Image (cartoon, helix red, strand yellow):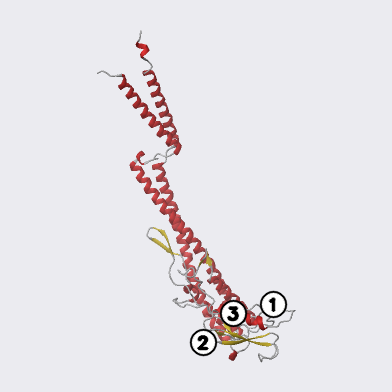
Amino acid sequence: MRVSTKQMHNVVNGFIAKNSKMLLKAQERVATRKLINRPSDDPAGIGRVLDYRKTMSSIDQYLRNITIAKTRVDFTVTNLGEVDDLLHDARDLAVTHSSSEATDRETAAQQIGDIYDRILDIANTKLGGDYLFAGHKTGTRPFPLNEVTTGAESTLSGGEYFTISSSSTDYYVWYDIDNGSTDPNVGGRTAIEVDIASGDTPAQVAAKTANAIDALADFSASQSGSRVTISSGGIPTDAADNDTEFFFHSPTYSGDNKRTSVIAGSGMTVRVNAHGNEVFTGSGVTNGADIFSVLRDLKEGLENDDTTAIVNQVDELTNAINQVERVMSKQSATFQRLESTEGHWKEFKENIEDMLSSTEDADLALAIVELQTQQTAYEASLSAAANMFRQSLLDFLG
């Protein structure tokens, strides 16, 4: 069989091209440290790689969800722990002053008022701009200060109050500046008319009262400020040293009872919220207690020196403590479950990464050896071709 020079040339070029291609792939594997750089490198392997990557993407999302959930649950437990401590302090005060021989109940009432205010602050706590205890209504203040206390003309006496209602109209409020006559128009007492419309909000009522006081009050230059306090805690001894404000009481829950859950796995959801009714109002809770009502009643019992009223709140405070501790226990268990699930996913992710690496990643040492082998083969093919076609037409002349 006659083999032409052209045929030899084509065969040699084919081998050189093949070696060149294999050398290029070897260089690519060393540069990328990957066995599979395109689907054609390993059609079966690329399918496994895509599955592994999809699984890892899902795991990463679960881990992000769990991290966010753990932050919320931990923050909730911290706040509930403070509420629990405050309620224990309130119960201790109630027990101490449940005896008819107890003294200094006025100071205890002030302490209960401070506890009330702090628990109300916690009930309206935000996390990342969302209210923590509002259920799904995270943009709604769960316990708005929506009831105003002040005094009506017909029932005026120092520190008493009524709740603004839809029938509200003109009322007179008075303030005892120097403990003068009980007549609101004699001595140190000043009567101020405040025009309150039936649709006024608490903030509007407060503003109207403050403006009326500012317009009519005539305090001496030695006194700082020009406003008084409206509260249920008695008559201020020096009204001019106080800022005008309303004492809001019995806040009502404006959130809802819906669950907030996170997806922590395929088909696995974990509840991470605690709403205001189960924590603070006791609505729908066995032996539940409205914490704010209990504290208010205890404060009023201490202010009125009413031993029976004080004693009645001891058991209610115990119910309130149990109520908060039950929710705190559930949240702590949720945190442990999230941590356990997080550990599972982290371990599983490591296994998936190992399988992905064994399928996709190249052994660098072997890849370098293969590169050197392909480099040698390529250079040999070039050398052989050069020797094979070294003769020219001049060699056949003569």
Q: Quadrant of the N terminus?
A: top left
Contact flag, marks 2 and 1 (Cβ < 8 Å): no
Rounded to the nearest angstrom, the CA distance separating label 2 from label 3 is 17 Å
Question: Mark 3 highlights which residue?
Answer: 206
Taking depth in this image into account, of 140 and 101 the one nearest to the observer is 140
Q: Residues within 10 Å of mark 1 (few under 14, many from 20)?
A: some
x, y percent for residue 340: 45, 58
Quarter of image, res 236: bottom right
Residue 340, above or below 182? above
x, y percent for residue 93: 60, 78
Q: Secondary structure at mark 1?
A: loop
Quarter of image, res 157: bottom right
Which label was assigned to residue 167?
Answer: 2
Residue 43 visible within the image: yes
Give the residue drawn at x 40%, y 23%: 382
Residue 5, above or below 217? above
Labels in figure, total: 3
Q: Amino acid at mark 2?
A: Ser
Rounded to the nearest angstrom, the CA distance separating label 2 from label 1 is 33 Å
Question: Mark 1 highlights which residue?
Answer: 225
Q: Amino acid at mark 3?
A: Ala
N-term-proximal mark, 2 vs 1: 2
Q: Secondary structure at mark 2?
A: loop
Q: Amino acid at mark 1?
A: Gly
Q: Residue furthest right?
A: 222
x, y percent for residue 12: 34, 24
